[in-house]
Amino acid sequence: MKFSADPESRKTVGRLLFKVGVCFAVALFDGRPFLLSLASWLALAGLITAVFAVLRRERFLIGAYSQWIEVVCLMGLSIFSYLNSIPA
């Protein structure tokens, strides 16, 4: 299956995957439990991305990915990781 999108959307998806990979790698070496650490690093990456989106005056684009979609994905992954870190 080929991913057909405009170049800006491809850059956004690439940045998202890179940030998730970096957060995953940093969380492996953190002293806290992995999922809790991953949740905090993903949230931090989401907050930093949101600040840059505001500074760049990025808009929500229909039919294309923007930095705001990246923020939503990072925060969603962060919440998911945090909820899975809570013992049952």
Image (cartoon, rainbow, N blue to C red):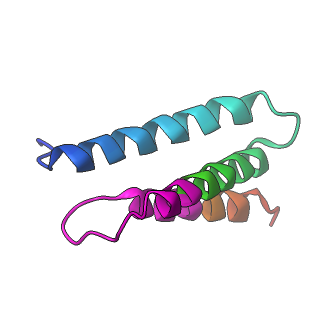
> In this figure, what is the number of numbered marks?
0
Q: Position of 10 compared to 47: left or right?
A: left
Q: What's the residue at 14%, 49% (across, down)?
A: 6
Q: Point out residue 84 in the picture as x, y percentages from the top left corner.
A: 69, 60
Residue 78 at x, y percent in the picture: 63, 58
Q: Quadrant of residue 86?
A: bottom right
Seen from the viewer's position, the closer of residues 33 and 74 is: 74
Q: Is residue 33 left or right of residue 80?
A: right
Q: Is residue 26 magenta?
A: no
Inspect the magenta stretch and tell me whether residue 69 lies in it. Answer: yes
Residue 81 found in image quarter: bottom right
| Residue nearer the viewer, 17 or 9 | 9
Q: Residue at x 63, y 58 (%)?
A: 47
Residue at coordinates 41% horizontally, 57% vertically from top-left? 67
- In the image, 28 versus 74, the foreground residue is 74
The residue located at (78%, 27%) in the rendering is 29
Rendering coords of residue 87 (x, y %): 82, 62
| Residue 26 horizontal/vertical position (percent) | 70, 31
Magenta segment's dominant SS is helix
Residue 25 visible to the viewer: yes
Residue farthest to the right?
31
| Residue 77 visible within the image | no
Quadrant where the C terminus is found in the figure: bottom right
Quarter of the N terminus within the rendering = top left
Q: Which residues make up the magenta segment?
A: 50-77
